[in-house]
Amino acid sequence: MSKLLITNARMVNEGRVNEGDLLVVDGRIDRIGAGISAPGVEVIDAAGQVLMPGMIDDQVHFREPGVTYKADMATESHAAIAGGITSYMEMPNTNPQTVTLERLEEKYGLARGRAWGNHAFYLGATNDNIDEIRRLAPDQTCGIKVFMGASTGNMLVDDAATLEQIFRDAPMLIATHCEDTPSIQANEQHYREQYGDEIPMRFHPLIRSEEACWKSSSMAVDLARRHGSRLHVLHLTTARELELFEAGPIGAKRITAEACVHHLYFSEADYEQRGSFIKCNPAIKRAEDRAALRAALAEDRLDVIATDHAPHTLEEKQERSYFKAPAGLPLVQHALAMALELVHDGVLTLPKAVHKVSHGPAELFNVRERGYLREGYWADLTLVDMQTPQRVERADVLYKCGWSPLEGDTLRSRVTTTLVNGELKYRNGEFFGTASGRRLEFDR
């Protein structure tokens, strides 16, 4: 019987902050309270630190199979647990694409014994795989990913009849990337006429524009309302889109939405210094949009915070041509600390931040026995030092791609310790054990 005791922690859970201890036995939270005694058990003194359930990231691209020169399940999940992310949900635009039930199960096989965190994989929608979607068992995947806009890997679903079928027949949550391709193409042509292929990177948020986002996200919401679908709109970037969503608890909603850490952290002013290193889709937009996203999190109009972690090699990102530089940022190693910047800035309370990164994703996806500090739940735990800043340096980056868009920035918190399924995996820069993440289970 394995045991571990965390003492003197500032525990943040379900809207409350309490000082106390937490005992882990055989991978699960056995007891929460004050003055817990367990002779002979390994003890972690968490005095001065925040203890919270590990972050559940509902949107990552770990590039496996097919693009593993950029990243793979082992390297990126390793970086994720150093950042306090204990569970993740990975996207289907790999090579081959995860668009059949066979490919979905093959992907779970690839993760076995290599994923440091707990994991689930989306089934991707295409214009011709509606029968695969209909065959899904409720607990087989975290959700169905629909690219309602430009996508890598030719996964754009742009057939109106197919979209109607997906939203009518999907047996579970539909997660959408919403950008309108014709709008983007028209904007590209407009700027190409002025600049040729040398479009300045600062025009990226005007090419992947507010209008392009609105047209697609409003279409998704309309489809979901007409068919009664369970819809989750990924990575919102504009103030205008927020009017499509209602404030309130997740359990009362059929339609939810999220913000990603980079859209909450950067603004269009950062293109001048960082250029292609912050090029992503949908684009980082105005400071006014960033402020609106932050406010929407505080009022529960936006339900979760995620990463959309999407690494490319340093050589690829150093490409100065707008059209050749790929879109996507590596983020999981510092995402929780980025989210906690909102606490330091007074935008979110600490309990609210924990809800957005842990409780919210667990409830939204019906994740079984994770995402909370509850007796009997799996001990996916993160300790955070809110008082000790960290400067992001390239030498400390753990991603296979070897760089971060945050290099040179200082974050005001740092993850010190991560437990996955009750096992100590990371503490103060040192890793322990092996990759033993489990397949996520869902109560549906």
Image (tube, rainbow, N blue to C red):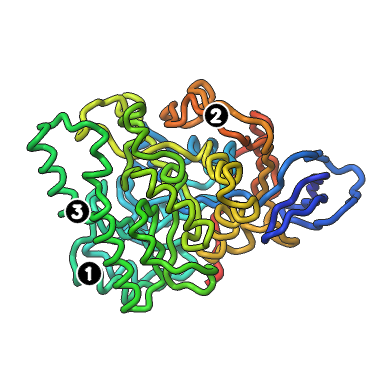
Determine the CA span between mark 3 and mark 1. Answer: 17 Å
Quick one: SS at disc 1?
helix
The residue labelled by disc 1 is 162
Q: Nearer the viewer, residue 385 or 99?
A: 385
Residue 392 visible within the image: yes
> Looking at this rendering, what residue extends furthest in the top direction?
395
Q: Amino acid at mark 1?
A: Thr
Mark pair 1, 2: CA separation? 46 Å
Q: In the image, residue 43 lies at what x, y percent?
A: 83, 40
The residue type indicated by label 3 comes to Thr
Q: CA distance from mark 3 to mark 2?
A: 36 Å
Q: Earlier in the sequence, mark 1 or mark 2?
A: 1
From the viewer's perspective, tell me whether residue 71 is left or right of residue 443. left
Report the residue marked by disc 3: 181
Relative horizontal placement of residue 410, taking residue 429 as reference (left or right):
left
Indicate the quadrant where residue 387 lies.
top right
Q: Which label's residue is closer to the chain start, 3 or 2? A: 3
Q: Is residue 326 left or right of residue 39?
A: left
Q: Which residue is nearer to you in this view: 402 or 358?
A: 358
Query: For the residues carrying marks 1 and 2, which lies nearer the camera in this image?
Result: 2
* Image coordinates for residue 23, horizontal then vertical, percent: 80, 51
Residue 410: assigned label:
2
Q: Residue at x 39, y 43 (%)?
A: 287
Looking at the rendered structure, the kind of residue marked 2 is Thr
Q: Which mark is residue 347?
A: none
Image point (50%, 60%), residue name = 303
